[in-house]
Image: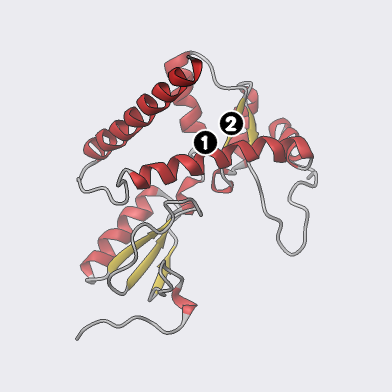
Amino acid sequence: MTATWPDSPIGGRLGDGRHATATDRPETVDALRDVVVARVAQGQALHPQGGGTALDYGLPPRAPGVAIDTRGCDVGQLRPMLEQLQDRYGRTPSWYLADGGFRQFADIDWAWSHDTAAVIPAQGRDGKDPYAPQPNDGPGVTVWRELMSGALGQRMYWVRSQLECLFAQMRQRDLRQVLVRGSRKVRCVMLLHALAHNLLCGARLRAQAV
């Protein structure tokens, strides 16, 4: 029997006006792996959902299937990324801009203890102010709430929107789907795109300096 597109959006939305049969929301990389294995075994088409970037939906969906919301997998990834920077360069940046999926208080406090202030947005629930001080806030979270509740934090986070232009440029260079398997091969593809981007930016900057 040929699968049909759901008429109701209750299962989740896809690109091109289509709806998913269901939406899985794994909160760890291990859970993501298990979801993919289980859904493939069921013969389901998989449609990854991102955090609202220009690469959010990828290509228009061709077959009915399950949406996989990967935003929860960002939680807990802030500290490992900063640790990589510490190992490579001997220091962490003064500011770290990331989307709301990376907001974990333990990581924000850890970053502050290593001289890095987090610039990460938050959305309030039930009309509550997400930046209102709380009794159990650590020093980093206290600074984060104060920063993001003001105009300075919002202006700083606006800088991150410039990355959306980079995502759009990568789409123009046909980075829509990764056609290789394995983390090493995927990393190679992404590094080649990053190299191409840097070379083009360097050429543009040199031309402007003349």
Q: Which picture quadrant has residue 137?
A: top right
The answer to whether residue 141 of the structure is visible from this angle is no
- Give the Cα distance between marks 2 and 1: 9 Å
Label 2 environment density (alpha carbons within 10 Å; few <14, some 14–19, many ≥20)? some
Labels 2 and 1 touching (C-beta < 8 A): yes
Q: Is residue 76 above or below residue 53?
A: above
Relative side of 101 to 143, left or right: left
Residue drawn at x 48%, y 46% as measured from the top left: 74
| Residue type at numbered disc 2 | Tyr
The colour style of the image is secondary structure
- Residue positioned 32% across, 43% down in the render: 173
Q: Which residue is mark 1?
A: 78
Which residue is at 46% across, 71% downward?
Answer: 12
| Rendering coords of residue 96 (x, y %) | 59, 31
* Front one among 100 and 166: 166
- Residue 127 coordinates in the image, percent (x, y): 77, 62
Amino acid type, callout 1 = Leu
Name the spot of residue 83 as percent of width and height, x first: 48, 25
Lower sequence index among marks 2 and 1: 1
Can residue 27 be seen? Answer: yes
Label 1: how many Cα within 10 Å (few below 14, some 14–19, many 20+): many
Q: Is residue 125 above or below residue 198?
A: below
Is 75 displayed left or right of 132 in the figure?
left
Q: Looking at the rendering, in which quadrant would you find the N terminus?
A: bottom left
Q: Nearer the viewer, residue 161 or 129?
A: 161
SS of the residue at dot 1? helix
Left or right: 59 in relation to 116: left
- Please tell me the numbered disc located at residue 96: 2
Picture coordinates of residue 73 (x, y %)?
45, 49
> 127 and 210: which one is in front?
210
